[in-house]
Image (cartoon, grey):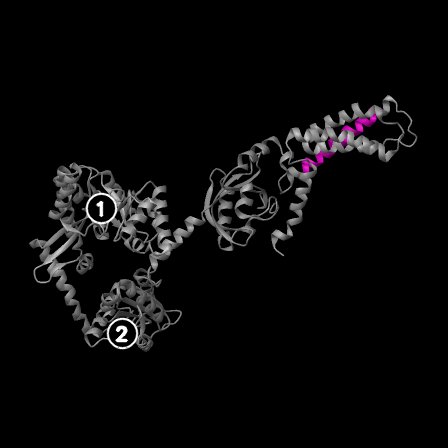
Amino acid sequence: MSTAERHAPGAASARVIGWLSLADLSAPAAFVVVAVLFPISWVAASALGGAAAVAPLWFCVPVFVAGLRFGPLGALVAGVTATVVAGPLLPADSATGASQAVADWVSRGLFFVLSGELVAYLFHARWQTSPGAAPAGVRSEGEQRFAALVQRATDMITVIDCEGRLKYESPAVERILGWPAGYRLGMPGQDFVHPQHRPAADAAGRAVIADPTQSQTVELRLLDSRGTWRWVETTVTNLLDEPTVEGVVINHRVVDERKSLEDELIHRAFHDSLTGLANRGQLSDRVKGSIARNGAGTRATSVLFIDLDDFKTVNDGFGHDAGDRLLVEVSGRLKRCVAARDLVARLGGDEFAVLVEHGAGCSEVASTVAQQVIDALEEPFDVAGHRTRVSASIGIAGCGSSVEDADSVLMRADIAMYHAKANGKNQFVFFTDEMQKGVLHRLDIESWLREALDTGQLRVYYQPVVSLSDRRVEAVEALVRWQHPNLGMLSPDDFLDVAEVTGLIVPLGKFVLRDACRQIRIWRERYDETMMVSVNLSAAQLRHENILEDVRLAMADHGVGPGALMVEVTEGALIGDVSGATAVLESLSSLGVTIAIDDFGTGYSSLSHLQLFPVDVIKVDKAFVAGMCGDSEHATLVRSVLAIAAEFSLQVVAEGIRSEEQHAQLHRLGCDYGQGYLYSRPLPAAQIDELLRAATALNVG
């Protein structure tokens, strides 16, 4: 039997007492009932005592009820009434019916008054000291005022005594949790708190007892009548010394929806949205832990870097939707090849990774798993009605103590994978020290990039950001491109990773910043004085000591005033030195720079960032936008992000809009701005100038 079931009789008795004391009636209605009880008592007394002998004790009924409902004063008034009105009609001797003397009248009146007073005092003393709450009609005046304050509160309000037992709960408890009114009274409040959260609840209680001047707020789960645990934000306040309360007041605000969104964002921060597998971030965390645990010279874990062979032909032949379905099926087969302790991750595109836990000296386990993967992929896949075979090239690297970080392990496995491809594909290869020579390509990229910065090979392209209401260009985002003399135009994916690792991202970002400030000055003067340009700040730039001076000089040198420049930072760039990032962003904001969080919802603790940092704009990640029209889950998430933005008074830019359907749905949901190939690809400044000139001419015309 549950605690609630064991305490149910106490709650039932409270309801009976409340009924007998007319607690549910207003004072005027209760007064009428007491008045009606006098003639009823006379009829009952006459009928049971006989025609000549009236039983006087029946007149105690209205006296007692008045005492229960209105307290000692009510008992006094009813007793005097019984004495004055009914006294003369009563016989002195109920047996013989003989008339009474004045002394009999007075003594019987005193009996009415005193017995009524005794009942009233005993009843109110009992309910004022019990762990439950007195019925509303018999509470003190102060308690009635307190009850009136919480009667219509939307949040749940409970009061516990010094022993932790519930002595009051507001009507919202029944409405939200489903527990009947009065059912839980007298029960320990902790019985309804999730065991995982009871220590936190205890700590909050001890804190307010130790310092009654300070309230405590915790998040925990409460049990409802259906057996479901509900998330609530709980504020605990010590009012034990308040005469009208004499308890600890607990305010519960339901936060189920917010917690669900937080859980979803956390899940997406560590999982691939397409396959549900772990993502690169979660894999890196696991690899870091493995490196920390490994002893000198041991390889207790290995990483398999898996790249599907010729996957591009699937996308080109059957379309990206078919390719995505194939990736989901591949992920399912990969999971069936590993043990429960191992981790399967999707790194992006057609790249996967497996972290294999095999223990020191047992690296052959990694080769066994790799072969199982190759064998699992031999079975043909059904792609768009066609039986298609897919193979994989796999590189294997150990997480030994000689490896400094997770990126190094992944890089070694990646290098080994390229050797597997070069050797004929559909095989696995272990990393060797000789393969390190392949890193020369990365070094070449670094060398070429330094030369590109010195010789003007870098270009800044701009992608319009439009108002979803009228498709008017409101801003542009500055994006870097590399015009390599031999390799042609390179996208950021080809060199930004190297720029980040080598620190070249700082001078590269400075180049983009100054070009963006120069261009926005021109476009504002020619076309729209409210137009804005946004530039991306990497984690390295955010931490660089001269970033504030670089931004200030770029704005000053090109005459860019407040409101013209926006900086975009990813959530990943904010992790680590939170206080330092906060200081930089606040300083930028004081310069009149707009702050935006890029790819919102894909990083860590998205909601907390909106509270910690001076954010003005959030950009919805293109992965959410891409799936919102065909996936209710994505649409719900976008809707939730827009609701959060509205709550924090932030503007929203949706990235990666490619179709009219996406545009229409985002506009219908209340999104402010959009960006994507539907409106324009990134363009050189000259073509943006033509676009703005045409739009201006159209408006004038």
Three-letter amino acid code of the residue under disc 1: Val
Q: Position of residue 585 (x, y in %)?
A: 26, 44
Residue under circle 1?
465
Q: Position of residue 673 (x, y in %)?
A: 27, 45
Which quadrant of the figure contains the N terminus? bottom right
Q: Is residue 304 left or right of residue 105?
A: left
Q: Position of residue 19 (x, y in %)?
A: 68, 39
Residue 436 is drawn in which quadrant? bottom left
**On screen, residue 78 above or below 491:** above
Q: Is residue 671 left or right of residue 134?
A: left
| Whole-number angstrom distance, CA of label 2 to CA of label 1 | 41 Å
Residue nearer the viewer, 322 or 486: 322
Looking at the image, can residue 171 be seen?
A: yes
- Check disc 1: other Cα within 10 Å, few if <14, some if 14-19, many if 20+: many
Residue nearer the viewer, 170 or 298: 170
Q: How many marks?
A: 2
Tell me, yes or no, whether the highlighted magenta stretch contains residue 369: no
- Residue sitting at x 9%, y 55%: 457
What is the secondary structure assignment of the residue under circle 1? Answer: strand
- Residue sitting at x 23%, y 72%: 416
- The answer to whether the residues at label 2 and label 1 have Cβ atoms under 8 Å apart is no
Q: Main secondary structure of the magenta part?
A: helix
Magenta residues?
105-126
What is the secondary structure assignment of the residue under circle 2? Answer: loop
Which quadrant of the figure contains the C terminus? top left
Residue 591 is drawn in which quadrant? top left
Residue under circle 2?
391
Residue at the top extreme, as displayed = 102
Tell me, yes or no, whether the highlighted magenta stretch contains residue 112: yes
